[in-house]
Amino acid sequence: MSAAPHAAAAPDRATSLPPGPPWPMVVQTFLFGGYRHRWLPTLRRRYGDAVLLRIAPRSRRMVLLARPEHIREVFSGSSTTFHAGEGNAILGPLMGPHSVLLLDEDDHLKVRRQLMPAFNGAALRGYRDLVAGITREQVGGWPVGRHAPIHPRMQAITLEVILRVVFGVTDRARLAALRPLVERVVSVSPLIMVAGFYPPLRNYGPWRRHLEVQERMDDLLYAEIAERRTADSLADRHDVLSRLLTTPESSLTDEELRDQLVTLLLAGHETTATGLAWAFHELARNPAVLASAQRVADERDDAYLGAVAKEALRLHPVIYETARVLTEPAEVAGYRLPAGVTVMPVIGLVHSDEEHHPRPREFRPERFLDPDPPSSHTWFPFGGGVRRCLGAGFSLMESEVILREVLTRFDVRAGTSRPEALKARNVTLAPRRGARVMLTPRRPGRRLR
């Protein structure tokens, strides 16, 4: 059943805003930034399916949504009324003002159209062998026979994949210098990201160090852009940067190119790596599911492996919520919300709701193979509507291939049956200890390949 408010009377639907906690903005910001996965379920039980928060900067009014029908109102609403770019403003200091994630309306559609060819069906089929090859290259150096975090292993694979997709074969020394910088930028804490709205903080301590790393990364990206602009035979290359430079309607500046490249590098590997870490964490804790996954991996049947990836994202949503800023008053969840309010479909609350996902705490990939699988409004780890992540198909394909390559080679065991705790990492929720598992090579007799 859906969670119902326990300690509050039914809200007055004639009011313009739903109820919410009366605590100071700084307290709400702290809890939302670091403990949303614990705090938001509590708020739903206390206040109901729509909850008002006030979050820094500038005491933004945010309305949390936990019902699929209310979320459908947001995802199907006009992109001129529901601004996702404004809703992603916290990403601005990292990704830049021209990022496809920060743009709205016509500007967003223009850039999205330029990026889509790199992530459509034909391109995806060409990437499968790339992902498999990179995975095979890396698994040979993994620790075996002892418990170790698998999250960094997944990050190494997905970072290498996205570097090759974005840049293709290019200056290897430059890519070698870029890898550790991307890793450091993507590990930024939520507090560092919030500091982007307070310029004086940028001159101090961790904020200053983060900016220095980001500037070094930018120098490498601008050097690659400059070199690529003068390169021959760009039309024969299929990496994203070359596509952006040769698209007929593209006249992107260096700054615009930089922002798209950073967006792809950061968003294009961290979320997939984290989802895979959770998948291996759950496989290690569920031997029957692991056995099924290994069997289909040996048979090269990716449908079940895709269900494993989807179920990991349901049980452990990497992105806990998504956001839209209202440019004009709008009816949402029975309230007449004023312009300027941020409406926030909470992925984690819907994914854990027993009404939509029976036995929601169980890791059961079969739910995605049922005749009536979860809908796009009860399972939406990539967002929804016209702003659904353009790399969603790429991420799921990559997850299937990596799962297959690892599971045909290794058994996966957990050190404990207890689920690993979460930690907030940039805008994602990652395993606190890196998803510690023990890998052991599979015996030849247990493999079909």
Image: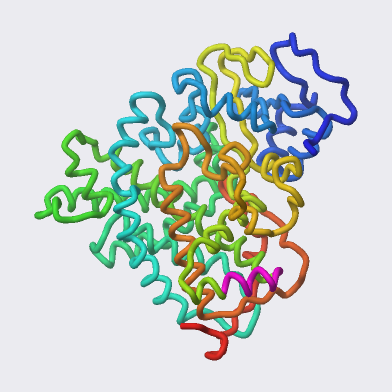
Asked if residue 269 is among those painted magenta in the image, a careful observer would answer no
Q: In front: 288, or 55? A: 288
Query: How are the residues colored?
Result: rainbow
Closer to the camera, 21 or 409?
A: 409
In which quadrant of the rendered view does residue 348 lie? top right
* Whether residue 253 is situated above or below residue 237 in the rendered picture: above
The quarter of the displayed image where residue 164 is located: bottom left
- The magenta stretch is 285-294
Residue 265 drawn at (x, y percent): 40, 52
**Residue 140 visible from this viewpoint:** yes
Look at the image and say whether residue 293 sits in the magenta stretch: yes
Q: Is residue 121 left or right of residue 381?
A: left
Can residue 199 be seen here? The reply is no
Residue 271 in the figure: left or right of residue 32: left
The kind of secondary structure the magenta stretch mainly shows is helix
- Residue 129 appears at what percent x and percent y? 34, 67
Q: Residue at x 19, y 48 (%)?
A: 226
Q: Is residue 287 left or right of residue 3?
A: left
Q: Residue furthest right?
A: 7
Measuring from the top left, give residue 376's x and y in whole percent.
Answer: 56, 39
Work out which quarter of the rendered image holds the N terminus and state it.
top right
Q: Residue furthest left?
A: 232
Q: Say which residue appears at 69% left-offset and 17% top-offset.
A: 334
At x 42% / y 58%, what residue is drawn?
181
Decide which of 137, 24 is in the foreground and name it.
137
Please provide percent x and percent y for residue 103.
40, 30
